[in-house]
Each structure stands twice: as structure tokens, then as C-alpha cells.
Image: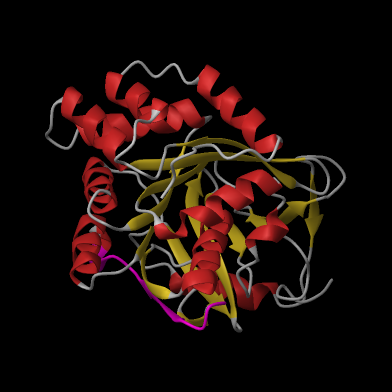
Amino acid sequence: MGLINEVKFSDLYITPDKTCYIWSGKTDCGLMTITFDDFPEFLAGLETEYDGKNCSYLLNYKGRNYRVERTVALQGPQYCARKMPTTVPDLKDLGIDAGVYKHLVSLSGAYGLILLAGATGSGKSTTVSALLKEYLSLKGGYAFTIEDPIEMPLDGEYHSQDGELGLCKQTVPPEGKWEEGLKSALRSKPRYILLGEIRTPEVASEALRAATSGHLVLSTIHANNVSDAVNSLVKYAASSGISEEMAYDLVANGFLACIHQILEGVPKRAKQTYLFANPNTQKSCQVRGILRSGKLNLGTVLEQQKIKLQRGLPLFSDMI
């Protein structure tokens, strides 16, 4: 027994008969039942916040945010409530390899699209939020996020290491129209743009166009590996009304990085696979060439980049 906000867990599963389950912590995926002193009040909040249409929504319960997924089973509604952190973690604390961290930080002055890929619950949103926080804390500048729901507390002012100020404005897309939210963001001329997720052709094409017009765009995408993430991006772009050849070209021009993430072990730690393009778009780049060709055989270049970063070597000799 205890209060929901005080008990440590990531995801809370509530069945139609009001039984609660959380991760047991003994294995990668085993669950255990749990009871809470304030469960009736929490459940009432879940039911009140549901608007009858959007099954993904945010619940603020006594000052703590929960990302909620509501589904309907044969016996009635059931919920998954993810407890969101009260602060955005530092990028260094997420278990990212030193070489990958160093290269990611070096991209703060670049433009292009950085994708965090993975399955549901793999920590994509946490990592991409920590990356944006890192850039604002290092360089300052104006950041604009478009999220539904807003997950991590990024909004506000940042004081960078070189004395500059950073500012982040978090927004929800109007009536779920992500592409409209992105167009609105571009009118305010942000240095950084964070999109909660790329999941439609329109959002993919607008994100890539923003990435090729002087913005550093960060987003997440559901994928099983780096190659799947890039393929999904191309398919989305091609479905937005342009030819497949133009889609490959748009992805090649806008792509900067893709990090695929899974959580392993007990306690769970992030494990990443990564692919980077040369941020200096005026120089030749093997990755952009592969993307432009449409023959996405990325295995060799993934291994080459992994070895370089593990040895502390720069990926590109002519970076900006």
C-alpha cells in the first residue's frame, strides 16, 4: 500500500476489474499486482480526463504527470499510465557511449534531422528530450516543441555554459494537426524543433523540409532497427505526394542521425545502435550517398561507425 505518486514504477496497468500491475523488477518483463491507498481518486482522474475521443492523453495527478493510453477490452476500459519524470535527465546519465555522446554534442551547431527510433517503452522520448536539454544548456537558442501529449518538462529558460540564454516553448498541435503545428513553429524561427513523433506522411515531409532549411529537428519514430527507421521515413515522405526518387533525395539531404534504442537488463539500461551523416553537407558523405541511391544496405557503414566511435576516432575529418 502507498500513494501512487510516491511508489516507484514506470508503467501502471489497470485492468477492467480495477486490478493494478507494475513491473516486478525481477526479470525483464515480469509483473506483480499492487494496491494504492488513493487508487479510487486516481482512477476517477483517469476517467474524468478522457474526452471521449483521444485515447492517448496526459493526466496531471496532484502535480505529477502521467501519460495515459486507454483501450477497451471485452470487460470494459483498461489503462496504461506511464509516470513521467519531474525533471529531464542529463544525457550523460542515460548510459550513452562516450564516443556517441561526444559526437551528438558536436551536432549542436548543425542542421538536419535526428531520429530516436525504437519500440514503445524503449525510452525514445526521454533520450530525445535529454538531447534537446543538452543543446540548450550548451549553446542556448530558441527551441519549439510539438507534442501530444507533452511528456517531459522542457518549457522555460536555460542558461548555457558560454553565458547565452536558451528558451524552450512546448506546444500541443492544434486539433491534432501536427503539420499545422510545425508550420506555425517555423514562423517563429526556432534553432531547434522537437516533434513528439513522426507517424504521418505530412509530418515526415514537413520535418525533412525544416531539417534542410537551417533547423536542427529532433523526433522519434517506431522501428525495430536503424534500417527500418530510415525505410519508414522514406515511405512516409513518398506517401506525401512526391515520387519515391524525390523521397530518397529529400531524406538524404535532411538526414543527420538515427539512434535506435532498446532497454535491456535488470535494472533496465539503454542499448543503442546509431547511424550518422556528415553534418557538413558540402562534403561527400557515404551515408547520404547510400540514402540517395535507395539501396539501404547499411550494415557495413553501421559497423564502421561503431568501431570508430568505440576507439574515440572522429567519424568525419571535415565536419563543420
Closest to the observer, 190 or 288: 288
Magenta-colored stretch includes residue 278: no
The span shown in magenta is 161-175
In terms of depth relative to the viewer, which is nearer, 161 or 232? 161
Is 100 drawn above or below residue 216 in the view shown? above
Q: Residue at x 53, y 29 (%)?
A: 225
Mark yes or no: residue 124 visible: no
Pick the front one: 138 or 86: 138
Place of residue 209 in the rendered image (x, y in percent of width and height, measured from the top left): 22, 48
**Residue drawn at (69%, 45%) of the image:** 97
Q: Residue furthest right?
A: 26
Please report the residue visible at 34 percent of the width from the left and 44 percent of the height from the top: 199
Residue 294: image quadrant is top left
Residue displayed at 54% across by 51% down: 104
Residue 234 on image: x %, y %? 30, 30
Residue 305 placement (x, y as % from top left): 57, 30
Residue at the outermost front position: 317
Work out which quarter of the rendered image holds the N terminus and state it: bottom right
Q: Relative to residue 58, is residue 64 drawn left or right? A: right
The answer to whether residue 49 of the structure is visible from this angle is yes
In which image quadrant can residue 180 be found?
bottom left
- Verify whether residue 167 appears in magenta: yes
Report the side of 144 relative to 245 (left or right): right
- Compared to residue 158, the image places residue 319 above or below, namely above
Where residue 117 appears, x then y in whole percent? 50, 41
